[in-house]
Every structure is written in structure tokens, then in C-alpha cells.
Image (spheres, rainbow, N blue to C red):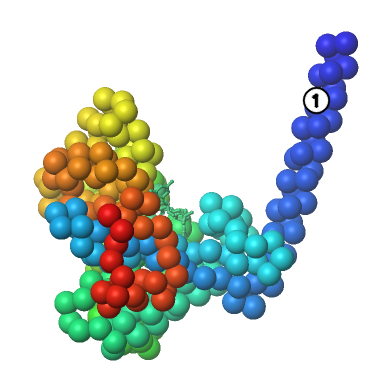
Amino acid sequence: RAKESGRSRFKVFSQRMHDQNVRLLELETELRKSLERDDFVTLLQPIVDLDNKRLNGFEALVRWNHPKLGMISPAEFIPLAEDTGLIHPLGEWVLRNVCSTIRDWEKQFPPGTPLNISINLSAKQFVQPTLIPQLREILELTGITPSNLRLEVAETVLMNHASIAIEMLGQLKDLGISLSMDDFGTGYSSLSYLRQFPIDALKIDRSFISRFGEDAESQVLVRSIISLAKNIGVAVVAEGVDTDVQSAMLKDLGCEYAQGYLFARPMPREKAEALLRGDEVLDI
Ligand code: C2E
Ligand code: MG
Ligand code: MG
Ligand code: MG
């Protein structure tokens, strides 16, 4: 009996693996078609200054809006896009889309408006030799103030390619672009390396913030990341802040910026513009 149920469990399992492969193939085909049709949107999630809860900028988060499959989360399609190389056209689409938003905003809003937008770069994008010329071209074409564009690269990506990363980040800085180390705390950065990265900010990974206040360990970790950031002279942003308690504790520890559902969810461009105009305020 035991054997039999083991076998049928295996059948269910392999059926599921098969279904999963079929779905992946389907998604790859659809991803290609969608790139031609422009089925993507970038949502913008506010980043706030914890001192006064004022807007400090946005992070662009891409969504795949498939006509039949509906909204697909980047957690599902970014890995697929990386494996198939489709991350390059997709990444270029995001860069052009966001830079044209920044260009429109620079024309529309008075100086001093916090209209910088961060873009996530995956591992493959970051090490792609065409990245720098591509960015230079987009910056020239749009004429934006380069520091209004921020690029986020995950700590693990930077650490896995440390010497190339230092070189690449240097070139990006030379273009005037702002840089953040994303998902910080998930890798094992050594302080000596960290000092060599010409970054402007560290973003504390959401997993630490969500456990923050519940277990002592994450509290120690968050505290040490904040002091580390101060030590090397970079700003610190907490991501995934979704309670008042987390927000208050982070502020007490000296964390300057935060992002999370407590302040706002990723939103369409029109809503972000209403915030920038002051027609709408963050609901906190
Ligand atoms: P990330 O860069 O760490 O982005 C933060 C993620 O946390 C976003 O998920 C955001 O919606 C979510 N988040 C923010 N605040 C909260 C909160 O309070 N609670 C919870 N539960 N979640 C919160 P999203 O949009 O699903 O993006 C997931 C990941 O996909 C991003 O992680 C980033 O690594 C990647 N990604 C998104 N857009 C792009 C893109 O344009 N290009 C590339 N290469 N990767 C992207
Ligand atoms: Mg990010
Ligand atoms: Mg992040
Ligand atoms: Mg994260």
C-alpha cells in the first residue's frame, strides 16, 4: 500500500513538473509577443523621508499586463526573462519608459520637486557591456538630470562580481547616475569591499523589516545595517515597511528613508503625479 501511494504521489509530482514546464514555455512565447506589443507597465512606489513623512522619490516596479493571463508579477517573469535573454529588451524598455517619465516631470514640476526614480537592474543587465553606452544614449536623448535616475543592484549581484562591480559602478557614477545597493543583508558584504563601492544608498531587505519588532535578531541586524551605512557615509532606505511600529522603530534607529505598504503601494504614473502636485497626500 505504502509503495502504491508513493508511486501515485510521484505521478502527481511529475504531472505538476510537466505542467510547470508547459507553463514556462507558454510564458516564454507570450513574453516575446508582449515585448512587441508593449504589454508592460511600470508602477511607481513612493519612498518617504521618515523625519517628516514627505515624499523623497519613487521606485519603478515593472508589471506584465498580459491581455489574457492578466497581471503577472516580476517575481514570476524576471527569472524567466533572465534565463531567456529577454531581460535585455525588457530592461531597455523599462529604462526608456522611466527616463521619459523623468523628462516629462522635469518639464512639468518646479525645481526641488522630489522626482527621482529608481530602476532595478538584474544580474545579467548589470554585467552587460552595452549597458553604459545604452544609458549614455538614453540620457542624451531625454536630456534628464542624470542624478534623477537611480539604479538599484542587489547586494548579492555586486558581491558575486565585486571587482567588475566596482568598475561598473564607477562608470555609472561618471554618468552622474545615483546608485543603490538593493536587498541589503541577504549577502555577506565585507566592510572593506563595501567601502569601495561608489554607492549612494543601501536598501535594507524587506525580510528583515517584516520580522523587525518580532524577533531580537532582526532588530540587531537592522540596527547594525543602519550604523554601517552611517559609517561609510551612505543613505539608508528600509523596504517593506508596513506597520506604524516598524516605521517608528526605524526612525528611532536613525534610518532616513522608507518604502512600504504603510505609506503607499506601487501606483500608476497618474497617481504619482497627483502626489507630486500635492493634489493627493500620502495616507499616513
Ligand atoms: P525589490 O526591488 O526588492 O522591490 C521591492 C518589492 O517589495 C516590490 O515587489 C514591492 O511591491 C514590494 N513591497 C514594497 N513594499 C511592501 C510592503 O510593505 N509589503 C510587502 N509585502 N511587499 C512590499 P514587486 O513589485 O513584486 O517586485 C519584486 C522584485 O522584482 C523587485 O524586488 C525587483 O527585484 C524585481 N523587479 C521589479 N521591477 C523590475 C524591473 O523593472 N527590472 C528588473 N530587473 N527587476 C525588477
Ligand atoms: Mg529594488
Ligand atoms: Mg529591494
Ligand atoms: Mg527586496
Left or right, residue 195 beside residue 28 = left
> Image height check: is 207 above or below 174?
above
Q: Amino acid at mark 1?
A: Arg
What percent of the width, then of the height, locates residue 199? Answer: 23, 58
- Residue drawn at x 29%, y 62% is 282
> Image height check: is 175 above or below 266?
below
**Extreme residue toward the top, this view:** 1
- Residue drawn at x 40%, y 57% is 265
- 94 vs 105, nearest the viewer: 105
Q: Quadrant of residue 96?
A: bottom left
Q: Quadrant of residue 117?
A: bottom left
Q: Quadrant of the N terminus?
A: top right
- Residue located beneath label 1 in the image: 9
What percent of the width, then of the height, locates residue 121? Answer: 42, 61
- 124 vs 181, nearest the viewer: 181
**Considering the numbered disc 1 on the image, is that residue within a helix, a strand or a loop?**
helix
> Image height check: is 90 above or below 36?
above
Decide: few, some or many residues near mark 1? Use Cα within 10 Å; few <14, some 14-19, many ≥20. few
